[in-house]
Amino acid sequence: MISQKLFTSSSFSISKASFATSKNVVSTTTETSKNATTKLPSKSGTNILLIHAGQPRTPFYTREYLTKLWGNYKIPKFCRQPIADAYWNSSKLLKKCVTDCEKYPILNEVIDGFSLSIERSLASITPEFRPVKCRSAYLFDTPTIEESIENIIQEGTDNLIILSLYPFEVNHLTKPMLSTVEKVLQKRTKSFGNDASSLIRVAQNSHVSFHHTTLSNIATNESIIQYWAERIRSNLDGYDSVIFTSSLPLSNRRKFTSSFCETAKRVMYVLYDSYPKAIPWRISYHSSWEQFWPPLTQNTLQNQVKNLRKNGRNKTLVIPFSELFQNFDTETILPALISTQKDVHLLSPEINDKALIHSITEVLKNSLLQKIAAKEFNVSLKAAAAGSSNKILV
């Protein structure tokens, strides 16, 4: 009798387990079938696209890069190639840029390594947004921005964050990059619902939908402010003054210089909180490697060094404030300018800068968490509106 009861109980347990297993198999098969139909992974996760203009490494590609760049300056098409050729033939410094870059790692490879580090860092601190994939794309190089976004949409994603690797908005670089992003999204997706400004995009003729965010002008983000303050503080021993420098764009100069100066001021205020003495600082501008014209300002690096020397400051640290990675400006242009000055040193960007990786990760994490907060806020608003409506009906 006892054995019969045990047998019956066991049979029931086995039958129950078999049913559960069968149910799981059906569920898995259904999910697999669904994924095979939509060609999407069961969890699309988060895609980060880091965008940059790129940098040439040979005379041919340097002239090709410049020819494309002149279009962003609104120079007529028929003039671009002759101007690029004339600039190349007449500028020893430009040729030195191309020669010097052979001593440094290839920029694309540096940014690709940086992307991988961001991917690992973000995945570790935001597991709820996994899988995380971070890649890079370029305005004048490969992979292109358009191609990369097309691939992400085709693969499927829940979140797409586009991040400009230029700390400040510069019309001839950041504007064309962001314009390219917008054109691809307009071509391949549409806004969710009737709101044209919706951040949710739905791919046309596809099951893919995702939340889209574009991050630019990241120099003003608190995480990046903290990054620069700490980097300057840890390199300031032996110096009694600081100069923040950047190339100066032709258009929107007032907006750019205002943002640049205000951001530098914020960095120094943070620095003063942890540094034992006040450090005088200045702003300077220089012509970038692709600009064959002078900076058109009195605030040049040479003038600011003279000003500091008149005020009794004898050793100066120069901060390439608008650069996160080594490029022609930090490798050749700025060292050439500084070489004519005594006791002036450049704080060059570092390869595999862990502090920068952490700061960019924080920027991305905050963007993702803001999305959740906004979603929860909208749900609470709808719930409150429904509650008010029910009260009115009663």
Image (cartoon, helix red, strand yellow):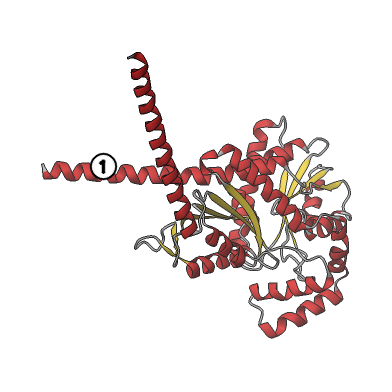
Q: Is there any visible trace of residue 224 in the rendered image? A: no
| Residue at horizontal 86 percent and vertical 75 percent from the top | 90
Q: Quadrant of the N terminus?
A: top left
Q: Quadrant of the C terminus?
A: top left
Name the amino acid, label 1. Answer: Ala
Looking at the image, is 207 positioned above or below residue 114? Answer: below
Looking at the image, is 103 positioned above or below residue 364? Answer: below
Q: Residue furthest top?
A: 2
| Residue at horizontal 56 percent and vertical 65 percent from the top | 150
Q: Residue furthest bottom?
A: 78
| Residue identified by numbered label 1 | 384
Label 1: state its secondary structure: helix
* Nearest the eye: 224 or 150: 150
Q: Is there any visible trace of residue 24 in the rendered image? A: yes
**Residue 107: % across, % down:** 76, 57
Q: Residues within 10 Å of mark 1 (few under 14, many from 20)?
A: few
